[in-house]
Image (cartoon, rainbow, N blue to C red):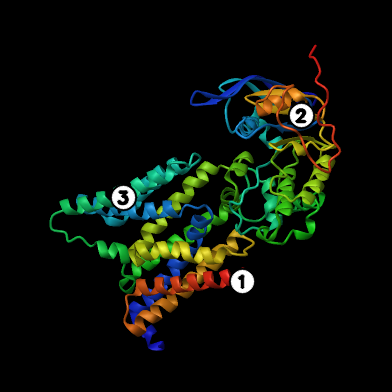
């Protein structure tokens, strides 16, 4: 099993898993406690519109996708802040529209073979060194922003109305949160794919939330859960020659349902 | 210092043309313990939001402690209605109380010593200081309610605004919570909003009934007239009999003719 580390691509995959876990622990915690899982799903799918746009215009993919997702995030921040009654419907519309927009643009782009599968499932086994550095930079930025505005994020997540009355700029923090979600998702999708991003954003924070006493503790715990799932998933995929992303999700899902079962029996 | 705690003049509010509150005039002096009563949908919550500056009146003026509500919100300790939402939120009791000391310059995770001391003092005042390090999710409804009162107190307010403070609390907890609120009302203005008439404990000093209009009564009692306004029946032919146990009643005073 140790020979797994002798391959460059495997070392890179592990590193990518670790770096993605840090980002997902931080962002996923905010996503779960603010109940914006659906919004995160919407942003990540709509991001494909940015990919399509980049190919159609012949521009570099990453900057265009980041800019596109930020636009979608800002739009969603506008509809989800405050009056939330119909917000989920609008999110659903943006979700579908972004994805369809991307696919149509891909159709219109001659000579390019549409690679939707790699957007959905990523390719953690072929992560280049440069992407690792990019993700390390993203992690650093996320830790810095969340640490700086920690009390504001805590107050907003716990009770936005009360936080607003205390003079916390909740609207700005809400927008900042969705923008962080957008940027993180775009960066991580390149590495591990859309489906794994959603799994890492939701399952570890859910497991980490129970019985916790601080938001920071929940972020740390969910990052650790992510690391655990990534390592064991990659090991399984290596041992049984399975798709890496799906193996990681399988481990996380089994753990999730097992813990649900245990919780049900205890209650 | 002597401006009224709450002053509403010709206040109206409506959503999309359907009026919720109409022509409301109300003046409540500081130091009172006011119970705001009314049926669900009668405009209590709207009134609360207007007092907090979360909504703007369509007509008339609102003054809280002599200021615009949005300016006064830092002098008001607000306790929202307890809901099951966020039941599992990972936060300790002390951290929850500390949120009442937030301001727009609260950067980085660490709370200053002064804030921690103040929050601890407020937890002590409501009798839950021994739970300070526990996760909030471990607490009972009554204990949670006390923590939220501590959070409201932590900002050193001049007025407390409490939305249905006894709704999710068992009867015993309710009585001791009422004692606590009575104690707090000795040092600051307390405004309590409820749909439940039994909140009129012996500590309450005045009552306002809200059902599209507001009827103010400067004594801790509900007149048949107010009761009728709240529940849509005439003052003298009320089909509802008021029955309650345990609380010494002074609820139905004889109807007075207004001068």
Disc 1 to disc 2, how far (Cα)?
Answer: 47 Å
Q: Percent from the top left, x then y, of residue A257?
A: 48, 70
For marks 1 and 3 on the same chain, the one whose residue lies earlier in the sequence: 3
Tell me: B219 left or right of B237: right
Q: Chain of mark 1?
A: A
Tags 1 and 2 both on a single chain: no
- Residue under numbered circle 2: B207
Q: Total marks drawn?
A: 3
- Residue under numbered circle 3: A96
- What element does badge 1 sit on? helix
Residues A157 and B181: in front is B181
Disc 3 to disc 2, how far (Cα)?
Answer: 53 Å
Q: Percent from the top left, x then y, of residue A220?
A: 55, 66
- Residue under numbered circle 1: A266
Q: Residues within 10 Å of mark 1 (few under 14, many from 20)?
A: few
Q: Residues within 10 Å of mark 3 (few under 14, many from 20)?
A: some
Of the 4 image quadrants, the one containing the N terminus of chain A is: bottom left
């Amino acid at each position: 099993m140790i020979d797994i580390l002798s391959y460059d691509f495997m070392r890179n995959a592990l590193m990518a898993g670790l770096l993605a876990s840090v980002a997902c622990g931080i962002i996923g915690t905010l996503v779960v406690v603010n109940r914006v899982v659906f919004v995160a799903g919407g942003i990540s799918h709509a991001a494909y519109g940015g990919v399509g746009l980049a190919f159609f215009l012949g521009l570099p993919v990453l900057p265009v996708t980041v800019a596109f997702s930020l636009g979608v995030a800002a739009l969603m921040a506008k509809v989800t802040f405050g009056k939330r009654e119909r917000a989920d419907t609008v999110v659903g519309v943006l979700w579908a529209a972004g994805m369809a927009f991307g696919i149509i643009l891909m159709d219109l782009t001659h000579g390019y073979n549409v690679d939707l599968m790699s957007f959905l499932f990523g390719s953690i086994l072929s992560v280049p060194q440069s992407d690792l550095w990019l993700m390390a930079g993203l992690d650093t930025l996320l830790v810095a922003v969340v640490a700086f505005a920690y009390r504001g994020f805590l107050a907003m997540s716990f009770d936005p109305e009360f936080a607003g009355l205390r003079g916390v700029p909740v609207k700005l923090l809400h927008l900042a949160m969705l923008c962080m979600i957008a940027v993180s998702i775009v960066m991580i999708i390149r590495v591990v794919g859309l489906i794994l991003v959603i799994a890492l954003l939701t399952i570890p924070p859910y497991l980490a939330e129970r019985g916790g006493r601080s938001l920071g503790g929940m972020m740390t715990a969910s990052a650790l859960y992510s690391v655990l799932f990534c390592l064991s998933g990659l090991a399984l995929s290596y041992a049984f020659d399975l798709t890496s992303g799906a193996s990681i999700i399988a481990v996380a899902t089994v753990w999730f349902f097992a813990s649900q079962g245990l919780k049900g029996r205890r209650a | 210092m002597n401006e009224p705690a709450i002053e509403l003049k010709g206040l109206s509010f409506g959503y999309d043309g359907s009026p919720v509150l109409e022509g409301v005039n109300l003046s409540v002096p500081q130091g009172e313990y006011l119970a705001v009563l009314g049926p669900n949908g009668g405009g209590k919550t709207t009134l609360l939001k207007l007092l907090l500056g979360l909504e703007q009146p369509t007509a008339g003026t609102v003054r809280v402690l002599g200021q615009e509500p949005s300016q006064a919100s830092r002098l008001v300790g607000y306790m929202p209605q307890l809901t099951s939402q966020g039941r599992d939120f990972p936060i300790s009791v002390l951290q929850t109380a500390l949120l009442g000391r937030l301001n727009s310059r609260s950067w980085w995770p660490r709370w200053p010593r002064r804030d921690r001391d103040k929050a601890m003092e407020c937890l002590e005042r409501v009798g839950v200081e021994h739970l300070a390090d526990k996760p909030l999710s471990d607490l009972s409804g009554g204990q949670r309610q006390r923590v939220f009162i501590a959070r409201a107190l932590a900002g050193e307010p001049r007025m407390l605004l409490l939305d249905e403070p006894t709704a999710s609390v068992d009867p015993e907890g309710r009585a001791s919570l009422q004692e606590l609120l009575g104690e707090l009302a000795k040092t600051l203005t307390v405004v309590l909003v409820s749909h439940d008439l039994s909140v009129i404990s012996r500590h309450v000093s005045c009552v306002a009934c809200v059902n599209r209009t507001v009827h103010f009564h400067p004594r801790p009692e509900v007149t048949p007239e107010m009761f009728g306004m709240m529940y849509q029946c005439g003052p003298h032919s009320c089909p509802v009999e008021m029955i309650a146990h345990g609380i010494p009643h002074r609820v139905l005073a004889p109807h007075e003719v207004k001068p």
